[in-house]
Image: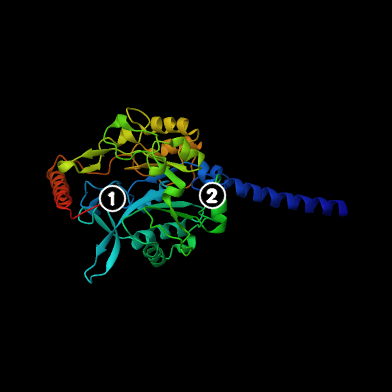
Amino acid sequence: MYTFALASILLSGLSFTSAAAIANQTKACNNSPSLCSRSYNNITHLGAHDSPFVRDQTTGFSTSGNQYYNSTVQLSAGVRLLTAQIHPFTASGGQTEWHLCHTSCDLLDVGKLSDWLSEIKTWMDQNPNEVVTVLIVNDGASNSDLDAQFQTANIVSYAYAPATSATVPAQWPTLDSFISSGKRLLTFIAYQEPSNSTSTPYLMNEFTYIFENPFDVTQANNFSCTANRPSAVNGATDKALSGFMMPLMNHFLDTQQIFDIETPNAQAAPITNGMNGTGNLLGAATSCAAEYQKPPNFILVDFFNVGPAISTVDKLNGISSPVGRAAVSTSSALPSTSGAQGLEISLAGLAASAVLALSMAFGAFLL
């Protein structure tokens, strides 16, 4: 009788242990169980370049738009790095607001930074096993300005802060560690003000932790893996890597418009984000992985759904069966430009470019 009872207890314990093990194996972090135990800097994260600048009805199909789908859809479809630009905007009351503007608020303004951060928070609330990275290109906001935007969006509670910014970690926490701690939003700021303040440690200086390859590319055969930014490692990729900086691979094409204004090259996106053809994403990522002796930690693309770019990222991460990822069309969401609507869109884009160019020529704008 006692033997039977003991056996029952052991079997019961075994079943609980097995259930826990199975649950751990089937938990998906960033759409894959295999990523949970991997360090943040041992993963390739797909990034949406200029994430909030969308080429759809909400922006009049602006030719400055870098994406076809908004940030919420991007996240649901597997994007885990969102980048944006912020610029000062003078509101009707005379106060300065921080807006998401593409190069200039006269060209494309899609609203307040805090509203975009609120959108990201809403998605994170609904997806508790996902680690998200935000990279903000900053045109003059102080750390306190930025913190106010994050506080307004009520997203600070998710923000990860490193133990110290004095050294760059050789190994970052695992995705599971970020998720378990609740600190699963990583925020990097490009062009952050010099500051000794410890009040906003979650606002990490991008170029302390990350290096980038060249980004201003207009020819498909001109992509390079060589470190370009920050200036301290320009042309010195080995120095960046030996300092444990994470490589961010810019991989998007621009096209020159009137007055030498560059806009995202949507026509080239199927090849640029694909696996075949001159300048394709898989070929570029493979070359950079060989040069870095590791896959890039971040791959930044325009029109993320085309290609689709996520296929190359899955290949780099060794993922064959992603979990919980929303499907999106892999074709262009832009309507045909052959009709009257397309002509109107093109003329509107050219007019905005002309206004911006004239402003730049007379010194009204400095990036």
Q: Is residue 358 visible?
A: yes
Q: Residue 313: percent from the left, percent from the top?
A: 44, 38
Q: Which residue is mark 1?
A: 54
> Disc 2 versus disc 1: distance between alpha carbons?
29 Å
Q: Nearer the viewer, residue 63 or 156?
A: 156
Name the residue type under label 2. Answer: Leu
Q: Nearer the viewer, residue 268 or 210?
A: 210
Left/right placement of residue 204 relative to residue 306 reads right
Count up the numbered dots: 2
Q: What residue occupies the far top of the structure in this picture?
A: 277
Mark drawn on residue 289: none
Q: Residues within 10 Å of mark 1 (few under 14, many from 20)?
A: many
Q: Secondary structure at mark 2?
A: helix
Q: Is residue 76 visible?
A: no
Q: Quadrant of residue 119?
A: bottom left
Q: Which residue is mark 2?
A: 175
In the displayed structure, would residue 92 be above or below residue 367? below
Q: Residue 353: percent from the left, percent from the top?
A: 17, 48
Quadrant in which the N terminus is drawn: bottom right
Give the residue at x 50% y 54%: 165
Q: Residue 137: percent from the left, percent from the top?
A: 34, 52
Name the residue type under label 1. Answer: Val
Q: Residue 85: percent from the left, percent from the top?
A: 32, 53
Q: Secondary structure at mark 1?
A: loop
Q: Nearer the viewer, residue 154 or 21?
A: 154
Q: Earlier in the sequence, mark 2 or mark 1?
A: 1
- Coloured how? rainbow
